[in-house]
Amino acid sequence: MLRDKICPECKSKGLVQDYDRAEIVCSNCGLVIEEGILDMGPEWRAFDSEQRDERERTGAPMTYMIHDKGLSTEIDWRNKDVHGRDLSPRRRAQVYRMRKWQSRMKVSSSAARNLAFALTEIVRLSSHLKLPKNIREAAAVLYRRCLEEDLIRGRSIEGMASACLYAACRQCRVPRTLDEISEHARVEKKEIAKDYRYIMRELGFNLPPTNPMDYLPRFASQLGVSPAVQRKATEILKEAIDRELLSGRSPKGIAAASLYIASILEDERKTQREVSDVANVTEVTIRNRYKELQDELGLQVEI
């Protein structure tokens, strides 16, 4: 906030916030620019992270991965009182009934039950595919929007949840193929693709085609090649994009072929079988893309 302000008297940017006097003062000429400012920080002090966690009175941040966004209360599963003592059998039975009714009330409507099941499916798929939290959140937001637009009616929850996760991966540029998602999903690849096209059409989304560049870091990491190989593969891909050689080609195949060529040029040879296993494409595809890139870009590759 202070970086955007200057002293009206001497035009200096050296402003200092005096917490004791609740003032903003110019360190150059001493002019008091603001007074009576509010301190938005906590009233308590903490000297380490453990102390800070103990004294915080706020809960977990709001998340779209929980059907009620994490804003509802929870009755703890431990049958203990505030002093840590075990509850009596009678009190334990009362708490058990309260806990049961609270869990029922949290998903009392059919829409809430639908959302809770779909979010669980998104979390399960994301865990199998090792996807980061931001993609889970994006998929949850997209599914909530589908629910609001009444797009779920007549379609399976698993299919729509898988399609939303696939769309979120493309939106966040962490691509996963339909084959990878359908491998862990509870529906067929054909249904996921159909639901994905339906969501894109009804919500008016227009996601660009997957860029082969997005696959390079993952493939390079799984192959265990050096940063020099990844940089060389990036250069090959950029030149192929500039010459418009990607039209009608699989992004995975182009990325795998560029990594294969780069590994040879940088003297870190990887076999076509190793590259095809990582990229989940056939060796024939890698050979075809490799020959096209070699001929069109004039690369001198000695196998």
Image (cartoon, rainbow, N blue to C red):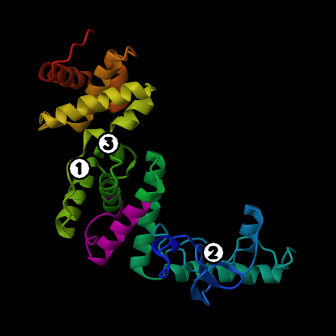
Q: Quadrant of residue 206?
A: bottom left
The magenta segment: 136-159
Left or right: where does residue 215 sit relative to residue 285?
Answer: right
The correct choice, above or below, for 249 with respect to 102 in the image is above
Q: Which residue is mark 1?
A: 190
Q: Residues within 10 Å of mark 1 (few under 14, many from 20)?
A: few
Residue depicted at x 61% and y 73%: 27
Q: Which residue is mark 3?
A: 214
Of residues 163 and 254, which is closer to you in this image? 254
Which type of secondary structure does the marked residue at label 1 adopt? helix
Which type of secondary structure does the marked residue at label 2 adopt? loop
Is residue 251 found inside the magenta-colored segment of the image? no
Of residues 262 and 70, which is closer to you in this image? 262
Residue contact at pointers 2 and 1, CB within 8 angstroms: no
Find the distance from the CA under tag 2 to the CA under tag 1. Answer: 42 Å
Q: Quadrant of residue 301?
A: top left
Is residue 155 found inside the magenta-colored segment of the image? yes
Residue depicted at x 26% and y 9%: 302
Q: Which residue is mark 2?
A: 59
Left or right: where does residue 217 sit relative to residue 88?
Answer: left
**Residue lying farthest top?**
302
| Mark 2 or 1: the one toward you | 2
| Residue 108 place in picture, x, y as percent | 48, 82
Q: Earlier in the sequence, mark 2 or mark 1?
A: 2
Q: Residues within 10 Å of mark 3 (few under 14, many from 20)?
A: some
| Residue 139 place in picture, x, y as percent | 37, 62
Q: Amino acid at mark 1?
A: Lys
